[in-house]
Amino acid sequence: MPPSTTDLGPRLLARARQAIAHHLGLAVAPADATEPELTARGACFVTLRQRGELRGCIGSVRAQRPLAEDLDTNAVAAASRDPRFPPLTADELDHTEIEVSLLSEPEFLDFADEDALLAQLRPGEDGLILFSGCRSATFLPQVWEQLPQPQDFLAALKRKAGLDPLRRAANLMAARYQVQKWLEAPRA
């Protein structure tokens, strides 16, 4: 009998940890996925924290490959290729907490101006992708914890995309999504 979706979170967390451990030479590679939840296309982010502080975060906003592959790739990238941090070392893994966010399909928003965009945002619930030409950036819904005001959230996302935070959103495109997230218990 295939595993139920109720235990998907713990399986994703364990697989992400194993993918990172394998990358660091501490474990074997995760087994090929056979469960329907892991072989179906999926998009996820993997966030790493140490003592509550961000240590890496990489992900996908669109489901373009099997979830297991997306998870393995993003877990290793969060540990080794987030440009904000040096690569994670084997000694750090034991005191690194992993969070996995499984994204819904992005929904493009129709808006004429910035006020209309802000009115559609649901703080604490929506992740947001902002597009301007070749530039784009996203914030997971978890970022609302640090930026609870929609105007601040949008201005910071513009900065992340390399845009002037004072630039009006009228000529931008945006899509929102939601996540299911799972977080490991704090590690010693």
Image (spheres, rainbow, N blue to C red):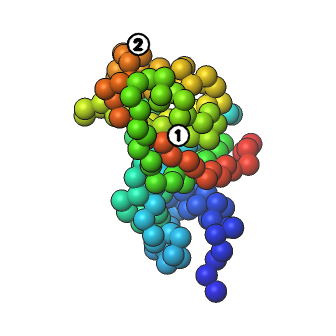
Q: Is residue 25 visible?
A: no
Q: Which residue is mark 1?
A: 127
- Count of marks, rendered view: 2
Q: Is residue 30 visible?
A: yes
Is 177 positioned to the left or the right of 164 in the image? Answer: right
Spatial CA distance of label 1 from label 2 is 21 Å
Residue 51 occupies which quadrant of the picture? Answer: top right
Name above or below for residue 97 compared with residue 165. Answer: below
Q: Which badge, 1 or 2, is on the more N-terminal residue? A: 1
**Other residues around mark 2 within 10 Å, as few (<14) / some (14–19) / many (≥20):** few
Of 120 and 65, which appears nearest the observer? 120
**Other residues around mark 1 within 10 Å, as few (<14) / some (14–19) / many (≥20):** many
Residue at the limit of the structure toward the bottom, as seen here:
1
Of 107 and 139, which appears nearest the observer? 107
User: Marks 1 and 2: CB-CB under 8 Å?
Assistant: no
Q: Quadrant of the N terminus?
A: bottom right
Q: Which residue is mark 2?
A: 166
Report the residue at 61% width, 57% height from top: 13
Name above or below for residue 31 compared with residue 183. Answer: below
Residue at the limit of the structure toward the left, as seen here:
134
Is 167 positioned to the left or the right of 19 in the image? Answer: left
Residue 66: x %, y % from top left: 42, 66
Inspect the image, locate mark 2, and give the three-letter code of the amino acid beneath it: Leu
Residue 120: x %, y % from top left: 53, 34
Report the residue at 64% width, 60% height from top: 9
Name above or below for residue 154 compared with residue 140. Answer: above
Name above or below for residue 14 compared with residue 80. Answer: below
Inspect the image, locate mark 1, and give the three-letter code of the amino acid beneath it: Gly
Of 113 and 5, which appears nearest the observer? 113
Report the residue at 64% width, 77% height from top: 3
Residue 92: x %, y % from top left: 59, 41
Q: Quadrant of the C terminus?
A: top right
